[in-house]
């Protein structure tokens, strides 16, 4: 059973940066794609970014493209989400998830293991 734990969230002023981490344990991780999703209050969960098992290619939602960068260290079973130039509309709970395959997709239904989420709050 794979367990995913996110960390790195917090309260940050608009324009600043945060780096989220997603660390896996208990199962195979480095042959699967990993995705980041977020859910703001009163809104549906939405796709943020995904990274294939090898680290490339990556894919981003238009709303974060150019500001967020996803990367991974398979030796450490960890995936990162570097978030720069944060905006108040980035406020949400951020989740990482392991894909059911080695290639990332934007649809949450294609991910089989999820973390518990980490809160990111951006104030202006």
Image (tube, rainbow, N blue to C red):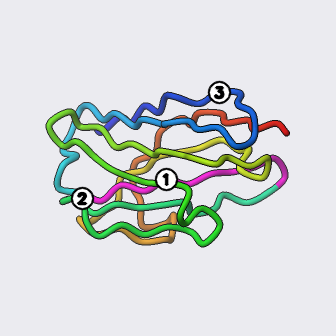
| Residue under the image location 18 percent in, 49 percent down | 30
Mark earlier in primary sequence (2, 1):
1
Question: Disc 3 or disc 1, which is closer to the eye?
Answer: 3
Q: Which of these two is toward me, 23 or 69?
A: 69
Callout 2: SS: loop
Main secondary structure of the magenta stretch: strand
Task: Name the residue carrying label 2.
Answer: 55
Mark earlier in primary sequence (3, 1):
3
Q: Which residues are magenta?
A: 33-42
Q: Is residue 38 left or right of residue 19?
A: right
| Within-10-Å neighbours for mark 1: few <14, some 14–19, many 20+ | many
Q: Which of these two is toward me, 101 or 55?
A: 55
Task: Name the residue carrying label 3.
Answer: 10
Task: Name the residue carrying label 1.
Answer: 36
Please tell me whether residue 88 is drawn above or below residue 17 in the rendered image: below
Q: Is residue 115 left or right of residue 112?
A: right
Callout 1: SS: strand
Check if mark 3's residue and mark 1's residue have beta carbons within 8 Å.
Answer: no
- Where in the figure is residue 3, as x and y percent of width and height? 35, 34
Callout 3: SS: strand
Residue 76, magenta (yes or no): no
| Within-10-Å neighbours for mark 3: few <14, some 14–19, many 20+ | some
Check if mark 2's residue and mark 1's residue have beta carbons within 8 Å.
Answer: no
Asked where in the image residue 18 lies, by quadrant, the reply is top right
Whole-angstrom CA distance, mark 3 to mark 2, is 26 Å
Q: Which of these two is toward me, 87 or 55?
A: 87
- Where in the figure is residue 107, as x and y percent of width and height? 50, 70
Q: Is residue 123 left or right of residue 119?
A: right
Mark earlier in primary sequence (3, 2):
3
Question: Which quarter of the figure is the N terminus placed in?
Answer: top left
| Residue under the image location 63 percent in, 62 percent down | 46
């Amino acid at each position: 059973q794979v367990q995913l734990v996110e960390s790195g969230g917090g309260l940050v002023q608009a324009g600043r940066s945060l780096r989220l981490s997603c660390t896996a344990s208990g199962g195979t991780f480095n042959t699967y794609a990993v995705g980041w999703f977020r859910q703001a209050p009163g809104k549906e969960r939405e796709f943020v970014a995904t990274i294939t098992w090898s680290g490339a290619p990556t894919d981003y939602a238009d709303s974060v493209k150019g500001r967020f960068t996803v990367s991974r260290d398979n030796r450490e079973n960890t995936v990162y989400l570097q978030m720069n130039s944060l905006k108040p509309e980035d406020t949400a709970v951020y989740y990482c998830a392991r894909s059911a395959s080695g290639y990332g997709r934007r649809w949450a239904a294609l991910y089989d293991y999820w973390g518990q989420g980490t809160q990111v709050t951006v104030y202006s």
